[in-house]
Amino acid sequence: MKTMVDLNCDMGEGFGQWVLGEAPDEKLMALISSANVAAGFHAGDPNTMDRVVKLAQQFGVGLGAHPGYRDLQGFGRRYIRTSAEELVNDVVYQVGAIREFGRRYGIALQHVKLHGALFMEAAVNEELSQLLVDTLQKTGSDAIIFCMGVSKTYEVALRLGHPVVREFYADRDYDDSGSIVFKRQVARPDPEQIAEKCVRACTEGLVRTVDGNDIEIEFESICFHSDTPGALEMGNAIRTALTEKGITIAAAATVLENAS
């Protein structure tokens, strides 16, 4: 049974006057321990990044960069075919933006989590994952990489000795391989059912797949998405359920420190 886990959410996923999701970032930030801040290519703009990074500092939340494909219109959920080098250059550009806003408010970059289709591409693309980790290390960054446990990204990070956190996806379905089922639209979930799913994963290490099978799952962080309908109610239910089970919610860096 887990005694400590990170709770993370994608944040700042708007652009100018356009805002994605029902819940204000301020209310979600109060529930989580790590924030994945949209870095401009799939969502986010300088003013939004500034506001959300400042919120992370105010709430004492671990700061993460959330880079995606250069795809504002498709919200980073469309695959874009280009070289691994070009993709990593885009990631470096976006990570740098979040890091600098963090410096403005005296908060270090804790982690990097790829977004949407880019996240799923890296999960199966060893070349891309290798170049991503190599580049982070060459720039002197020890930022934790967030990824699926069943992924090339996780394998490469382990092999290269880079800090890595495996996620459990509260509002996503799993297949029998342990991979999430990628969806472009997600229905409104029942908050209590989601909370029960998270508690079971923490206490039993199991999750039910779309085929009705129970599989083992290992993770250090629970992720829910701000654009999922009912995200605020879901986040509240998860946090309450974990706390009632005596599970401490802490930033990813703290979880890794306590696991070592």
Image (spheres, rainbow, N blue to C red):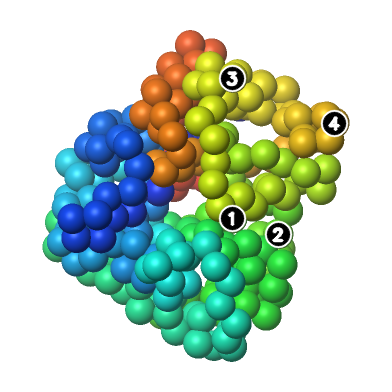
Q: Nearer the viewer, mark 2 or mark 3?
A: 3
Residue 61 appears in the picture as rendered: yes
Q: Residue at x 25, y 38 (%)?
A: 24
Q: CA distance from mark 2 to mark 3?
A: 26 Å
Give residue 118's quadrant in the image.
bottom right
Give the labeled residue for mark 2.
151
Give the labeled residue for mark 4.
213
**Residue type, numbered disc 3:** Gln
Q: CA distance from mark 3 to mark 1?
A: 24 Å
Give residue 203's quadrant in the image.
top right
Give the labeled residue for mark 3.
193
Q: Earlier in the sequence, mark 4 or mark 3?
A: 3
**Residue type, numbered disc 1:** Cys
Per the image, label 3 sits on a secondary structure element best described as helix
Give the labeled residue for mark 1.
147
Q: Residue at x 83, y 35 (%)?
A: 211
Q: Residue at x 42, y 75 (%)?
A: 70
Neighbor class of circle 4 (other Cα within 10 Å; few <14, some 14-19, many 20+) is: few
Per the image, label 1 sits on a secondary structure element best described as strand
**Residue type, numbered disc 4:** Asn
Contact between marks 4 and 3 (CB within 8 A): the answer is: no
* Front residue of 252 and 206: 206
Give residue 130's quadrant in the image.
bottom right
Q: Is residue 77 above or below residue 256?
A: below
Neighbor class of circle 2 (other Cα within 10 Å; few <14, some 14-19, many 20+) is: many
